[in-house]
Image (cartoon, rainbow, N blue to C red):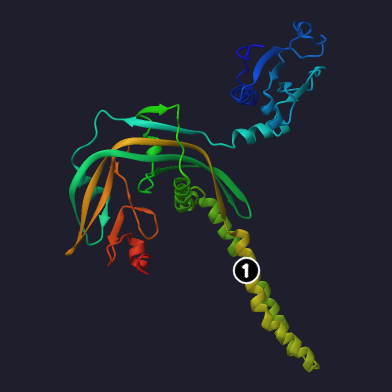
Amino acid sequence: MSSDTYTMEKDLDLTQFVCRFLKDKGAVLETVNMGFDNAESNGMESGLIKSGDKVVDILLPKELADALDVEEYISVAPDTDSIKSPKDHKLYAIQFQSPLVDRIVSMAGAKPPFLQASLKFDYIKTQGFANLIKEQFEFQKIKTRITGSGETKARYLLLTCRFLAQSDEQKQGLLDFSFNLDTGAMVSGMDRMMVNAQKEYQLKNIQGYSKKEIKNIHKLVSIYGPDAVEQELVGFVQSMNRRFKRDSLSLDEYYNALVNEMKESLARTGISARLVEEREEKIALIPDELAAKKNDLLNKYSIKINFTPVAALAVTTPCVSLLVTLIAGNRKRDISMIYNPVTKQIDPLVCQSCGMSTYFAGLCKNMHLNCLDCLNQGCTLCL
């Protein structure tokens, strides 16, 4: 069989996906057009096949066949109802939620695609950085002075993640992150600005990340992910909050009515002292029971978010490293800032307390760089 003879119609997207996946894994494929005119020539009885039906014969490597739990020689088709199964091998339907397609999808998504690219620029900014700092950053009671600059290389990771937000309902979608791996800053919008950059993709000897770097990437996603998801799911968050408030109010009304009813019953004549004591004990337990019910509600409507990487592009680009002196009264501290030629901006700084990127910063009494929120709450490195 020739591996280049199979072609599928444009509307058979799922079959195209399956065929491309199997071919990339080493399978050999051949399409058989099962119309009335050629049914006999393909070893099928005439009249059993609708005109235009397509069957793909596939010879699988043993390892791939074992992984998919199928035979080494199979046939697949989008619609198997009108096709008589071959006697010498099995015919599988390529349909959503079919067992074979589910196994292929799981295998295809098990390892996210990872690319590496180097960027090149004919021109990189060499001056005007002081004005950029004034335009982009706001420092609290600090003056800045550039004391040095030089061209260097910076590493960025453009990461696409699938998120699953689970509460009483669940929502899912995709989020794009752009991180400076050397500083930990999130460079918003860099992925969209990469379109016009001159790229040279590395196709061989692609190097992954060390365990320490992967752990750092997980940390960055955990830092920036929740806020990014909340912005994507404003309506979802508001809906869960409304439901929590509604059900919480219903609980308050129910237990308040219950307490009032039990207290009124104590005012009746003829009630024994033992019954009074028992009901008073029950009334005393109601606040704890209400608190437990509200805690259950909080767990029900709290939003838990999971992230799964689905694609990554590691980028190395020339940039300009700026040595900047921060001057607070008679105290000084030197920091490094990065001019990014893709965004044509200076990358944000990273708060030493919370790890978030920021354009609004200050120095604590021990000269730790903090975002304004952490500066007001107290530097965590000084506690």
Residue 272 % position (x, y): 80, 93
Q: Quadrant of residue 4?
A: top right
- In the image, residue 270 sits, relative to residue 51, either above or below, namely below
Give residue 66's position: percent from left, percent from top: 71, 30
Is residue 269 in sight in this rendering?
A: no
- Can residue 374 be seen? yes
The amino acid on which the numbered mark 1 sits, given as a three-letter code, is Lys
- In the image, what residue occupies the spot 34% across and 31% down? 119
Q: Position of residue 129 (x, y in %)?
A: 21, 44
Q: Alpha-carbon neighbours of circle 1 within 10 Å: few (<14), some, or many (≥20)?
A: some
Q: Nearer the viewer, residue 372 or 243?
A: 372
Left or right placement of residue 192 versus residue 240 in this view: left
Q: Is residue 75 left or right of residue 199?
A: right
4 shown above or below 356:
above
For the point 79% across and 9% down, the residue is 43
Residue 191 placement (x, y as % from top left):
40, 37
* Residue 89 in the image: above or below residue 228: above
Q: Secondary structure at mark 1?
A: helix
Question: What is the quadrant of residue 331 in the picture?
Answer: bottom left
* Quarter containing the C terminus: bottom left
Please state if 27 lies on the left or on the right of 74 as rendered.
Answer: left
Q: Which residue is mark 1?
A: 294
* Residue at x 66% of width, y 17% of height: 29
Query: Measured along the vertical axis of the image, is residue 69 above or below residue 359?
Result: above
Depth check, front residue: 347 or 168: 347
How many tags in the picture? 1
